[in-house]
């Protein structure tokens, strides 16, 4: 039996070393297969270890989130890196023509570099975490909208730069002429897409100056509404009537923007008019009532702008007492409820004091002329 087994092994060894397929022995192909299988197994084991470690870090504490993301970013591309390396190393023993070997090695290197680009593409998530951490400390929500835009831009840049790197360093392509052509084409594109570029620069202006944030009520041109979304091209407003309007960012950046949500107070100017037959004593009493009412509500007024009340004008049909106050906080419905209470008490107290409100009147004087016939 030992002799039979030895003879079988010898024949198998001779067959492996002498039989050829595509100008290479079976042994050379088996070496390539073993290198590829070994690399793939090693890559899968490393991927399993990284993903398992990432899940454990996610379950322990949130402070390991960056390490977990780094492990997850490496896990998926790693088997492809190992596959490319196995193909490259296992293929060293194969007999190939020069052109075929050049193409084979380039394909192996391309697999490795694509896996690396994929890894960098996924590492952009770590940059997003840092940006979210920074934007969470700001008062405005506009920069929160900027984070996904930055993430998309970085990922596009990774893909473009990775493609240029592979073309230049692996396939030895001269991209200078291509870039020059892109420059001329870019100029033509810029002229044709003038409005699009205007909106793009308008977006940059909005994100830099931050004249408003998501959820702010603003007034732009004839539109008054709440900001729902700010993108690269446009800003979406929800108008007070419920309609949505989409404004190009180029227009928004060049218009005067009134941010109603950022007002520190709501100013009211109230003209209280009384009749001309009001005596000076009753006029003084009317001013005293108004000032008492304002003093009783002093906690609702802005500390830097105390309320004011004066006898301001002799109008054509009334005496005008002007009341000015700056209500805070600048909540519209609370402001209306405050005005309702103020107006009701003012009406009641003036009626109790017998002070009459004026309304538009006209006095007509008729001059009776002497009858000429009676003279």
Image: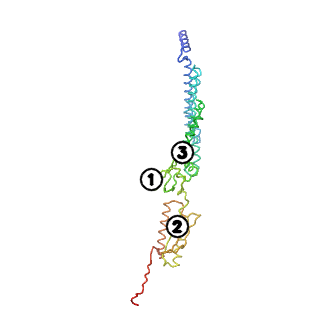
| Location of residue 243 in the rendering, given as x and y in whole percent from the top left corner | 44, 53
Point out the frontmost of discs 3 and 1.
3
Work out which residue is located at the far bottom of the displayed protein and give it.
375
> Please, what secondary structure does the residue beneath circle 1 have?
loop
* Residue 271 shows up from this direction: yes
Disc 3 is placed on an element classified as helix
Task: Give the residue number, with chain letter if any, for mark 2.
Answer: 269
Asked if 47 appears above or below 31 in the picture, the reply is: below
Q: CA distance from mark 2 to mark 3?
A: 51 Å
Residue 191's disc is 3
Local crowd size for mark 1, using a 10 Å CA cut-off: few (<14), some (14–19), many (≥20): few
Q: Nearer the viewer, residue 169 or 352?
A: 169
**Residue 77's x, y, as percent?**
55, 32
Residue located at (59% from left, 32% from top): 174
From mark 3 to mark 1, how far is it between C-alphas? 34 Å
Q: Tag 1 or tag 2, which sits nearer the N-term?
A: 1
Circle nearer the viewer, 2 or 1: 1
Distance (Cα) linking label 2 and label 1: 31 Å
Asked if residue 59 shows in the view, the reply is: no
Q: How was the colour assigned to the protein in this rendering?
A: rainbow
Q: Are marks 2 and 1 in contact (CB under 8 Å)?
A: no
The residue that disc 1 covers is 243
Please identify, in this view, whether the residue under mark 2 or under mark 3 is nearer the observer: 3
Q: Are marks 3 and 1 in contact (CB under 8 Å)?
A: no
Query: In the rendered view of the protein, which quadrant contains the C terminus?
Result: bottom left
Which numbered disc flags the more N-terminal residue, 2 or 3? 3
Location of residue 369 in the rendering, given as x and y in whole percent from the top left corner: 42, 85
């Amino acid at each position: 039996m030992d002799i039979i087994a030895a003879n079988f092994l010898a024949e198998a060894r001779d067959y492996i070393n002498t039989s050829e397929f595509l100008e290479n022995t079976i042994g050379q192909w088996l070496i390539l297969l073993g290198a590829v299988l070994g690399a793939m197994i090693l890559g899968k084991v490393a991927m399993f270890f990284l993903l398992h470690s990432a899940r454990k870090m996610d379950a322990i504490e949130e402070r390991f989130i960056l390490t977990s993301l780094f492990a997850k970013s490496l896990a998926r591309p790693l088997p492809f890196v190992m596959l490319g390396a196995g193909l490259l190393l296992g293929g060293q023993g194969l007999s190939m023509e020069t052109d075929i070997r050049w193409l084979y090695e380039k394909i192996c290197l391309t697999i490795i570099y694509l896996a690396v680009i994929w890894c960098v593409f996924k590492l952009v998530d770590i940059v997003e975490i840092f940006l979210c951490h920074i934007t969470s400390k700001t008062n405005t929500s506009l920069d929160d909208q900027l984070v996904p835009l930055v993430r998309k831009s970085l990922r596009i840049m990774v893909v473009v730069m990775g493609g240029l790197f592979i073309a230049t360093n692996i396939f030895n392509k001269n991209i200078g002429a291509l870039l020059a052509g892109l420059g001329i084409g870019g100029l033509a594109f810029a002229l044709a897409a003038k409005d699009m570029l205007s909106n793009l620069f308008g977006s940059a202006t909005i994100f830099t100056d931050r004249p408003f944030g998501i959820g702010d009520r603003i007034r732009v041109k004839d539109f008054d509404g709440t900001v729902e979304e700010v993108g690269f091209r446009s800003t979406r407003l929800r108008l007070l009537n419920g309609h949505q309007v989409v404004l190009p960012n180029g227009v928004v950046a060049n218009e005067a923007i009134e941010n109603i949500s950022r007002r520190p107070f709501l100013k009211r100017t109230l003209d209280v008019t009384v009749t001309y037959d009001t005596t000076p004593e009753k006029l003084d009493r009317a001013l005293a009532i108004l000032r008492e009412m304002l003093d009783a509500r002093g906690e609702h007024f802005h500390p830097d702008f105390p309320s004011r009340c004066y006898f301001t004008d002799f109008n054509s049909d009334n005496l005008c007492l002007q009341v000015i106050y700056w209500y805070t906080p600048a909540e519209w419905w609370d402001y209306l409820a405050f005005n309702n209470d103020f107006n009701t008490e003012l009406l009641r107290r003036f009626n109790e004091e017998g002070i009459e409100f004026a309304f538009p009147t006209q006095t007509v004087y008729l001059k009776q002329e002497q009858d000429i016939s009676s003279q």
